[in-house]
């Protein structure tokens, strides 16, 4: 992508050094936090080894697009770059297909529901963000829904708060971390990636979704 070739302006992590890009195990490495009203959150730090190299590949190879949306009776730029892959479409890197299958094996060993397509977001700097929201499609589905977010690049805060008000929780994710929101989370909680004034490198998130089981 023009202006972000190579490592995309990313300062690498010393903990991310690896001879190859690989997907780690889940199992006991996953830490679950029970939230409220049937919502839960799983965190698996450093799930992808060689994550900064994967970040660089995706920055260069994904056909990123900028979007504009209607908001408050005017058209504004969406503060991040986007790309989506529908279920059945090839993902932009085989490591992502491996990651998706690992998620399916871990979360659905005896169920029919599976993670399908993927949505990618590129946060170029601290001015890029996403406002408080719950996944629009998942809110209209049965209670058992799941969104798995793989974070590559510089760490950013992903914040969660109860819908209707309450104390927010903040998780700093990046460099191959996995965060999974499940249960009623998309209906009873909201999440956001807030803007930040401090210097921060680019971050890429890959969101895998399923609604059939969880």
Image (spheres, rainbow, N blue to C red):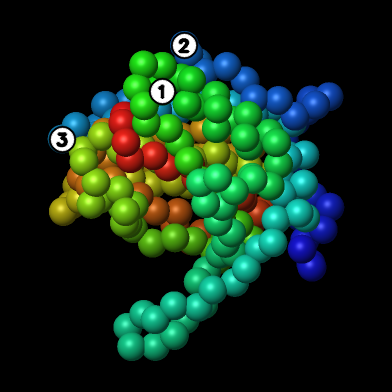
C-alpha distance separating marks 1 and 3: 20 Å
Q: Is residue 73 above or below residue 56?
A: below
Q: Residue furthest bottom?
A: 73
Name the residue at 76% across, 47% down: 56
Q: Give the image location of residue 13, x and y in percent.
A: 72, 35
Q: Give the image location of residue 197, x and y in percent.
A: 54, 62
Is residue 45 something one can see in this rendering?
Answer: no
Q: Nearer the viewer, mark 2 or mark 1?
A: 1
The answer to the question of whether label 2 and label 1 lie on touching residues, with beta carbons closer than 8 A, is no
- For disc 2, the marked residue is 28
- For disc 1, the marked residue is 107
Q: Give the image location of residue 15, x and y in percent.
A: 71, 27
Q: Is residue 36 above or below residue 140?
A: above
* Callout 2 secondary element: helix
Name the residue at 44% across, 85% down: 75
* Callout 1 secondary element: helix
């Amino acid at each position: 992508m023009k202006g972000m070739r190579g490592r995309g302006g990313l300062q690498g992590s010393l903990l991310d050094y690896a001879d190859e890009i690989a997907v780690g195990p889940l199992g006991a490495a996953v830490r679950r936090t029970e939230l409220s009203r049937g919502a839960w959150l799983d965190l698996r730090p450093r799930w992808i080894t060689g994550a900064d190299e994967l970040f660089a590949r995706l920055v260069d190879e994904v056909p990123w697009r900028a979007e504009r949306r209607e908001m408050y009776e005017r058209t504004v730029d969406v503060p991040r770059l986007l790309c989506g892959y529908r279920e059945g479409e090839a993902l932009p890197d085989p490591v992502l297909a491996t990651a998706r299958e690992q998620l399916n094996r871990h979360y659905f060993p005896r169920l029919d529901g599976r993670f399908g397509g993927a949505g990618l977001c590129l946060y170029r700097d601290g001015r890029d963000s996403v406002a408080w929201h719950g996944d629009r499609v998942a809110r209209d589905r049965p209670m058992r829904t799941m969104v798995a977010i793989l974070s590559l690049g510089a760490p950013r805060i992903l914040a969660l708060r109860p819908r209707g008000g309450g104390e927010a929780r903040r998780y700093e994710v990046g460099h191959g971390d996995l965060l999974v929101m499940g249960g009623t989370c998309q209906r009873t909680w909201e999440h956001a990636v807030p803007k930040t004034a401090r210097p921060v490198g680019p971050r890429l998130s890959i969101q895998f979704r399923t609604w059939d089981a969880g």
